[in-house]
Amino acid sequence: MAFQSPLIAIPKKTTQDVDWTGPIRTIIAQSYGEDPSVYTEECSVLQRCRQDAVRGAGSDQTARDLLYKYFGQLELLELRFAEIKVPFAWNDAFTEKLTTQTSLAFEKASIIHLISSVLSSLAQSPSRSDPEGLKRAYYNTRASAGMLTYINENFLHAPSTDLSREVVHLCIAIMTAQATEIFTEKLVEEKKSPALVSRSANSTAAFYNTALDEMKEFQGKGIFDRNWLYILQIKSKLFASLAQYYKAVADSAAGKHGPALVRFKMADTLAQEASRQSGTFAYTFVSTATPSLPHDAGTSLQEITKAHATVCAEAKDQATKDNDLIYHEVLPSEAALPAIEKLPAAAPITIQEVYGNPDVTKLIGPDIFIRLVPLAVHESASVYSEEKAKLVRAEVERVEISEGEIRAGLEHLGLPGLVSRWRKLAEDDEVDGEREVEISSQVRRLAEEISQAGSIEHSLRQLDGDRERCERELRELSALLDNESRECERMRAKYAPQFTQSPSGSQTANFRSNIASNLSALSSASSSDANLQSILKSIHPNLGLLYSGVGAVENAAAQIAAGKASAPQLDRGVSLLDLDDDVGTKKGLDEKEKEELRKAVADASERLDRLGKIRRERDEVLKDLKEKIQNDDVSSLLLLNRRSSGVEPQLFAAELEKFRPYQGRLAAAVQASASLLQELEMLVLQVEKGKGVKELQRSNKDRSRRVRDWERKLIEAGEGYAEIQAGLSKGLTYYESLGRVLDELKREVKGFVNSRESERNRMVGEIETRQRLGGSPPPASSTTSGARSLEDRLAALFVAPSSSPSYSPMPAPPQPPRQHITSSPLSGYPPPPAQVSTPSFPPPPPPVKPMNPYDLGSLSNLPSAFTFPAPPPTTHNTAQSHPQSTYGSSTYSYPSLPDQQSASPYPPPPTQPPRPSAQTYGSYGSPSQPAAYGGSYPAPPHSQTTYSSPPPSQPSYQPPQSQSQSQSQPIYGQQNYGQSSYAQQPSQQSYAAPSQGGSGYYPAPPNRPSYTSPPPPPQQQQQPQGQSQQYPNYPPPAGSYPSQPPPPLPPSQGQGPGQQGYGYGGYQYR
């Protein structure tokens, strides 16, 4: 055809801009509870998508694609914002009337109508002379009809005329008729059979007649263009003529010349009518007034009808001539002619088919609000995720069980190591006892680490040295405080009552408590150090082997495997008979057994290779299954089916079917691995039935057992080494921190002692100056009885432990006999000597009547019985003497210092007769603090001063001591430190062990009764009537003072259990 039949295009709807952002933000904040600002970009994308689709929409494919995309996003948007209210303003496609609705359905219907209009425009634009253009026109008309059908089926109560059911139905009829027309043109172009063309043309004519009848109902309503009516009329007659023409051609070919001639006449009549109407239409048609029709619609339609009328006239004339001259058939009436059959109508393309096209899906793109998922979809997706998790767990469990069975089976069979041993046996490469022994990686690593770390004996020696140094410093500090207290009391007894320095007992309580607490902590540390030593002793033989390195360990392993180790290193469970059997099996296998063994090695190796491949393939399949399940997301599918109820089980089942191939491959792999494992087990059993192999296998098992037991001992040694290293680290750190604490304590103690010494020297100097100016003689120990009386009263300063509420004072052990000499007034003393450090002691006076032991009247006037010459103040050094003491509450004995173990240049004290029983003195202090005082005076510490003048009037007395006591009680440098240290009360706060990084090592001093100098006693007190005990006078020994103190008193003569003595040696800790 030179001319193309014009097609009708549906007019386009127009719209105005709308705001999506505000309503969407409101719903996100109210319904989803999320921050709307997070979705600002998504709202902007949706806004641009609508503007691109509806503003100035053209009639090309780009406009169609933009509309496809926007409608697809509207569908997804409705799944999340079904209740959204946006004012959509659309103009009617036929009446141009503005309609505004807030429903999202109105927006969707308008977009679909606009898509239908664009598709109808695309159908009329291309040239249908070529097959591709014809095909596109046919598709677009059908798709346009499908879009309109979707509007009629899903949107009721249309608010505008163009969306009403009648108008939409008429548009559908026009699009269907035009699609059938295009199909008829295709049949004519392809020169199909006249019967088929007549049937198609008859269908086209019928559709145009239907549309024409429907359009007549809208006459006078001003909805449709009048030119549409003309087009429908012309085409209905044109295609009716075509149907008759091609049916007449078919009848003529079939020999029915009479009916054919009648149909030619009918076709000619219809063609003439169509030609006449087309001429009128062409004369009145104005293209600008009807944009829905092509600009050449009138001319084209006129030429088409004219040409068809000419063809029909020629065919009628020729048929009439032939019938008159040749056939002479009777012509039937038009009503008697059979009706022409119709072809089925061209089916519209539904909207589901359009959007099911992958190209259209790609045009839509991802969901703009994909991050915003409704709660119902989340719940459904979680249910599906649980289904996927069940599937994965089942497959993983199946694979793990299979892998466990394979590992257990191979380990039980000894594979693949057993195959290597078979190979060596078959090649005579293995001789029992001479093959290389493979030690475990753990033992090898232990040997490397321990050999690189080196020995730990040096660190243990350093630990012992640090402990001894700390203990020595603590005892030196204790002795320093004892010397200061002793010197203070000596000066008090010598210069009383002018000497007013307070006793240092209450002031040094905190120091002594700290010293005792640290000694207790050292005792616990000593136990830990001994534990480390015991661990080292238990593992020393094996540890020495690990020190030697990996080479020595491998050599020792070879000896152990060969049974050449020493007797203690052999496992007691190994039978000597087994060793003899091992020696007898070194002869090897015969040739037949070797050949069978080689074959078994090849079979086992091949099966092991297959088993390894199956395991790798199984793991890869499981990995792929996990990845596919992990990446599987059905949220979009659930979102699309959100409004459908009861589809989730079927949907989940259909989606899980995707993983069925992976499950089948895993099941096949598990079955194949189990079969191979059974074959390997049968092969091993068959090989081990051989006599030679059986004997060699037993020998190898025994050798392996010996090596494993030996390795276990080495591993235990390594664990002990690690434990010792950890203990060393803690111990060295502890002693380092304790050293810092002791340095601080030493500084405080020495500062205290120095300040006390300076104060004491100042007081002594003032007293002696006043005495020289007043003419009074210096105090001297001229009377033994006065000194002894003071000693007895000082011995009563014993406080019972506060932690023992049920404690009752017990009578003190017997005291040695002492001389009681009545003291004379201080004014009777001679002038003080020039040298204070070497005073002259007068001979003791004759004995007098014993004084009352409870008479404290002369305490302030009598010098101490243990009066020592005071050293010069400028040369006094408290650090010269380093007495040792035993820690009373500890059972650990520490070795004495080297300089204190040397022999003393002074002779031992002479033997004295036994002392009579001691007196129990009353309480000293306030009545609210009961304390029992008593006991014996501990011997004074060793003094380095040499006396040139006679000693004071105190006999050098050594109490008797039994041999058993002297053996059971340790003596360090002839000084019992348990009797010369401060007695710590059990109820007082103990000093905690030092810790790293802590603060406040020294706690607050405990609450102790404050001991002050006694008040001046009355001038004279008589001895009670009941007190008749007297002490005999002992003559002073000749010579100098003994250089060493007497040994400690036995329990029967010293202090009783639980008693603490406040004696010449200061406070005593027990």
Image (cartoon, helix red, strand yellow):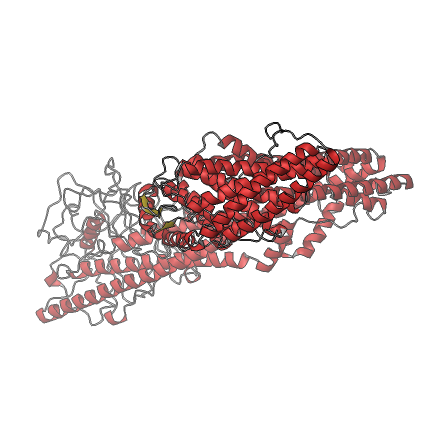
Q: Which residue corresponds to the image point at 26% horizontal and 60% vertical from the top-left?
A: 484
Q: Nearer the viewer, residue 740 or 844?
A: 740
Q: Is residue 666 visible?
A: no
Q: Position of residue 403 (x, y in %)?
A: 65, 38
Residue 906 is drawn in which quadrant?
A: bottom left
Residue 31 is drawn in which quadrant?
A: top left
Q: Is residue 1065 left or right of residue 760?
A: right
Q: Nearer the viewer, residue 625 or 715?
A: 625
Q: Is residue 767 visible?
A: yes
Q: Nearer the viewer, residue 166 or 1031?
A: 166
Q: How many marks?
A: 0
> In this rendering, is residue 897 above or below 803?
below
Q: Position of residue 413 (x, y in %)?
A: 73, 37
Q: Is residue 681 left or right of residue 118?
A: right
Q: Which residue corresponds to the image point at 16% horizontal and 51% vertical from the top-left?
A: 848
Q: Position of residue 1027 (x, y in %)?
A: 16, 41
Q: Nearer the viewer, residue 678 or 47?
A: 47
Q: Residue furthest top?
A: 336
Q: Residue furthest front?
A: 325
> In this rendering, is residue 208 above or below 131?
above
Q: Position of residue 118 (x, y in %)?
A: 47, 49
